[in-house]
Image (spheres, rainbow, N blue to C red):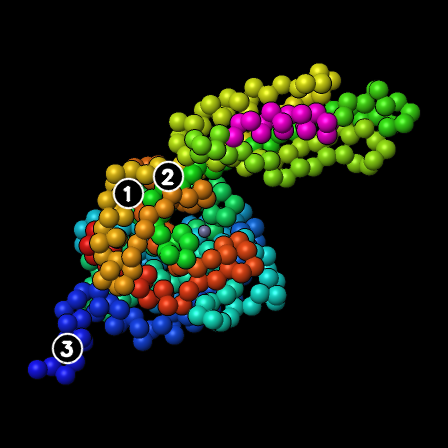
Amino acid sequence: MSTQPKKARRADDRSAALVDYLEPHLGAMINLIRDLVQYESPSHNKRAVDELGQYMADVFRGARGRVTMHWNDRFGDHLQADFEGEGPRVLLLGHHDTVWDVGTLKSTPFRRERGRLFGPGVLDMKTGLVQALFAIDALRAVRGKLPRPVTFLSVTDEEIGSESSRAVTERVAKECAAVFVLEPAFGLHGALKTARKGVGDYTVRVQGKAAHAGLDFKDGANAILELSRQLLKIEKFSDVKSGITVNPGVIRGGTRTNVVPAEASCEIDVRISKLSQSAALEKKFRSLRPIDRRCALEVEGGINRPPMERTAAAGKLFKLAQRLGPEVGLKLREAAVGGGSDGNFTAALGVPTLDGLGPVGEGAHASNESVLVDQLIPRTALLARLLEEL
Ligand SMILES: [Zn+2]
C-alpha cells in the first residue's frame, strides 16, 4: 500500500502533473512578473515600450519561440512568438503597454504583500503574459512537446484603441482555430469573459463667436452654452437596458471669464452590446445640428472596437474551461463585461475567443492594481490544459 495515496492518485491526473511542474517555478514566475512591471511601458512612449519588447523577445527566444517584431513608427513594435506543434494553431493574445506613465513605480513600486503582487500594469496585463510563457513551458516540460502550434502575440497600443495593431491581430487570428485572451479575469472569483461591449469615442466641437463679455455681449455666440445644450441631447443616446452607454468624459472650452467663448469641445466614450446598435448611434451623432444658428458643430469619431458578442463557439470554449477548472481547483463562472479588449476584434472575425484567462486580481487602471499570488499556478495550468484539450 502506498504511503502517499494522495500523491499517487494525483500522478494520474494530467492537470496535477502540470501543477506539480509549476509549483517549484512560482518564484521564477514572480521574478519575471517583477521584471515586466519594472520596465514601465505607457502606450505613448515608444522607446520605453520597445525596451520592454526587446526584453520579452529575449525571454521568448530563450523559450525557443520564433520571434517576429512587427515594426511600428508611432507606438512600440508588436511582439509575435511562434511555437511549433502539430494541428490547428491557437493564438495567445495580450498587450504589453499600460496606462501608467514612466515614474509611477516611484510611488507604486512592485511589491509582494498580503498574498498579492502590486505594481503598475501587474494585472492589466503583464502577469497574463508570464502565465502564457509558463503554460507553454509546462506543457513542453511535462508532455515533451506542445499539443499544437501556439502563437503568442503581444501588442503595444491596446490601452489606446489598438489602431496600429488591429490589422496584425486580425491577420494572425485568421490563421488560428481559437484565441485565448490573457486579459485579467473578471472579479476576485476569476470569471472568464465570453462577451464584451463594443467601444468607441466621439468628439463634438462647437465653433461659436468670441466677444467681450461686457462691451458687446450680444455679438458673441457662446460655444460652451451651445455645447451644453448638445450634451443634454447626447445624454439621451444612452439606453442602459439595451447596453448602450454614452459618457461625455472630457470637456474643454473658453479662454477667460470676460470673453464669450468661441470654442468648446467634448470627448465622449460610447459602448454598445450589439454590432447592430452601431449604425443607429452613429446616425444620432451625425444628425446633431446647432441650436444657436450662429454656432457651427463638428462631430468626429465612431465605434472602434466591435462588441464581442457571446457566440455558441465562445460558449463551448467556456464550457471546456469550466469542465477543466476543478482539476486545478477552480470553479469558473462566465461574465459579460463593459470593457473592450483585442478579443473583440478576433471574435468579430468569427474566430472562437475566450477572454479573461490572465490573472485574478483587482484595481486595473487604479492605484491598488494587484494580482492574487495563489491564483498564478492554477490559472497557468488551466491555460495549458485548454491548449491541449481544445
Ligand atoms: Zn488590458
Q: Residues within 10 Å of mark 2 (few under 14, many from 20)?
A: many
Residue at 83 percent across and 31 percent down: it is 259
Q: Nearer the viewer, residue 376 or 78?
A: 376
- Answer above or below: position of 263 versus 185: above
Q: Does the segment drawn in magenta span residue 236?
A: yes
Residue 22 lies, in percent from the top left, at: 29, 70
- Answer above or below: position of 363 versus 308: below
The residue indicated by pointer 3 is 5
| Residue segment shown in magenta | 223-238
Amino acid under label 2?
Answer: Met
Residue at 79 percent across and 36 percent down: it is 255
Q: Quadrant of residue 81?
A: bottom left
The residue indicated by pointer 1 is 314
The residue indicated by pointer 2 is 308
The reply, left or right, for residue 188 in relation to residue 266 is: left
Residue 96 lies, in percent from the top left, at: 46, 56
Amino acid under label 1?
Answer: Ala
The reply, left or right, for residue 253 in relation to residue 2 is: right
Q: Is residue 297 visible?
A: yes
Residue 49 lies, in percent from the top left, at: 51, 57
Q: Provide the secondary structure element on which disc 1 rests.
A: helix
Q: CA distance from mark 1 to mark 3?
A: 38 Å
Q: Earlier in the sequence, mark 1 or mark 2?
A: 2
Name the front one of labels 1 and 3.
3
The reply, left or right, for residue 325 in relation to residue 70 is: left
